[in-house]
Image (cartoon, rainbow, N blue to C red):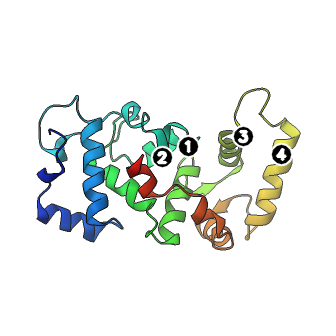
């Protein structure tokens, strides 16, 4: 690969621009970052390279993120747990976190990241894992069982519009739409490229 951004054809760059919320410059920066991560891979075509998840987790922006494993899982097109990510997976990740991405796109991916069991709803188990990821699971940071139950009850009271004991995607989007801080707090694709 050689790390040179010039190896992406204009046609491919244009195609990526049409399919993502990324600019030409961001796509070239993404290619450079991906090439740096892929330096140990064979010098084959970029479309055929799949970088192991553990190497993606070395990116400073992901290393500190409590949902780093979930982010890689959601954006990887591999069927295997540690199947890694392709360049197009990486572009999808950057596009979803791009400042240009719509609130609908951002909330869609956030919902998938928080839906740990992949059943299409955020249930009590998902919410407990979400809280533990945010607060930490060490003894000095972990919530007590009663605190966790109360917090989950509060979250469901606020978010579970149909009162079925879960938060579906529509309910999640409704909550997010009332929280402008959600978009500002999410890491941007630009941050992932420039660090």
Q: Earlier in the sequence, mark 4 or mark 2?
A: 2
In whole angstroms, how far apart are the C-alphas of marks 1 and 2?
A: 6 Å
> Residue 48: horizontal and vertical position, in percent?
17, 42
Alpha-carbon neighbours of circle 2 within 10 Å: few (<14), some, or many (≥20)? some
Q: Which residue is mark 1?
A: 67
| Secondary element type, mark 4 | helix
Residue 164: mark in rendering? none
Q: Residue at x 67, y 52 (%)?
A: 123
Badge 3 vs badge 2, beta-carbon distance below 8 Å:
no
Q: Earlier in the sequence, mark 3 or mark 4?
A: 3
Q: Residue at x 54, y 64 (%)?
A: 107
Answer with left or right where residue 84 lies relative to residue 161.
left
In whole angstroms, how far apart are the C-alphas of marks 1 and 3?
A: 12 Å
Q: Which residue is mark 2?
A: 71
Q: Nearer the viewer, residue 62 or 178?
A: 62
Q: Which residue is mark 3?
A: 135
Badge 1 vs badge 2, beta-carbon distance below 8 Å:
yes
In which image quadrant can residue 169 be found? bottom right
| Secondary element type, mark 2 | helix
Quarter holding the C terminus is top left
| Secondary element type, mark 1 | loop
Answer with left or right where residue 82 lies relative to residue 145.
left
């Amino acid at each position: 690969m050689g790390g040179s951004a010039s190896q992406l054809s204009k046609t491919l760059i244009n195609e990526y621009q049409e399919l993502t919320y990324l600019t030409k410059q961001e796509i070239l920066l993404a290619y450079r970052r991906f090439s740096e991560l892929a330096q140990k891979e064979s010098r084959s075509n970029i479309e055929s390279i799949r970088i192991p998840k553990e190497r993606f987790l070395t990116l400073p922006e992901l290393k500190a993120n409590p949902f780093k494993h979930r982010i890689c899982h959601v954006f990887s097109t591999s069927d295997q747990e540690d199947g890694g990510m392709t360049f197009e997976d990486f572009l999808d990740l950057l596009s979803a976190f791009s400042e240009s991405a719509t609130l609908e796109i951002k909330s869609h991916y956030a919902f998938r990241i928080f839906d740990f069991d992949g059943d299409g709803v955020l249930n009590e188990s998902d919410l407990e894992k979400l809280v533990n990821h945010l607060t930490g699971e060490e003894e000095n940071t972990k919530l007590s069982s009663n605190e966790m139950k109360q917090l989950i009850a509060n979250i469901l009271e606020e978010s579970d519009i149909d009162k079925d004991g879960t938060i579906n995607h529509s309910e999640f989007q409704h909550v997010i739409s009332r929280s402008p801080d959600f978009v500002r707090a999410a890491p941007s694709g630009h941050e992932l490229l420039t660090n």
